[in-house]
Image: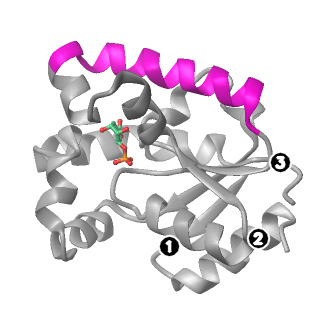
Amino acid sequence: MMKKNIILIGFMGVGKGTTARAFAKKYGVYNIDTDDLIESKENKEVKRIFEKKGEAYFRTCEQQTADWIEKCVKSTLISCGGGFYKVNNLKKLGTVVLLDASFEWIHNRLKTAKNSKSKLAKRPLFSDEKKAKALYKEREKAYRKVADVIVDVEKLSLEEQLKYIAKKCGVN
Ligand code: S3P
């Protein structure tokens, strides 16, 4: 049983979902995803929420989700949308773990993924590469600033990432 939640943050496409699912399986913990929580509550895909209600509305959904996690969720791995790190109570939610990689590495990962088209299609903020890169630049430092643990995913295999996160977060 984990003492604190693990809050997995990082840029779109860095592999938060993949790492979270593998971690949950290996260490027998529950894993929830903030985008999934928002989609289920709104009964709409993230892409549609952006189209129909706009980004500002989506950000209020993220804050509501953070408030719910703070009140109700314990001993859980929580993978977060790329902009979730901005919620005002992030540090109260658990140990913040950043999956870190360069923009080029992330872009290449998304482009060469088997389901590349669907991975890109569901991420409205990645539809324009230049804008996505600017967003990365804007967030890069802020991600590192809020992180308790930084995982260099370019250098570590998936298995190594899991072990590193477990060690840093006191999970065994
Ligand atoms: C966003 C990242 C997305 C999703 C939404 C906004 C962002 O999640 O929450 O499209 O602002 O970076 P992923 O990081 O899982 O792609």
**Mark sitting earlier along the chain (2/1):** 1
Residue stretch rendered in magenta on the structure: 52-73
Q: CA distance from mark 2 to mark 1?
A: 15 Å
* Mark 2: few/some/many CA within 10 Å (<14, 14-19, 20+): some
In the rendered image, which quarter is residue 152 located in?
bottom right
Q: Specify whether 29 is left or right of 126.
A: right
Amino acid type at mark 3 = Lys
From the viewer's perspective, is 108 left or right of 1? left
Q: Position of residue 146 (x, y in %)?
A: 64, 40
N-terminal of the pair, mark 2 or mark 3, is: 3
Choose between 156 and 36: the one closer to the eye: 36
Please tell me which residue is depicted at 54% across the width and 44% down the height of the picture.
143
The residue to which callout 3 is attached is: 4
Q: Residues within 10 Å of mark 3 (few under 14, many from 20)?
A: some
Q: Which residue is mark 1?
A: 153
Q: Residue at x 43, y 35 (%)?
A: 83
According to the image, label 2 marks what residue? 166
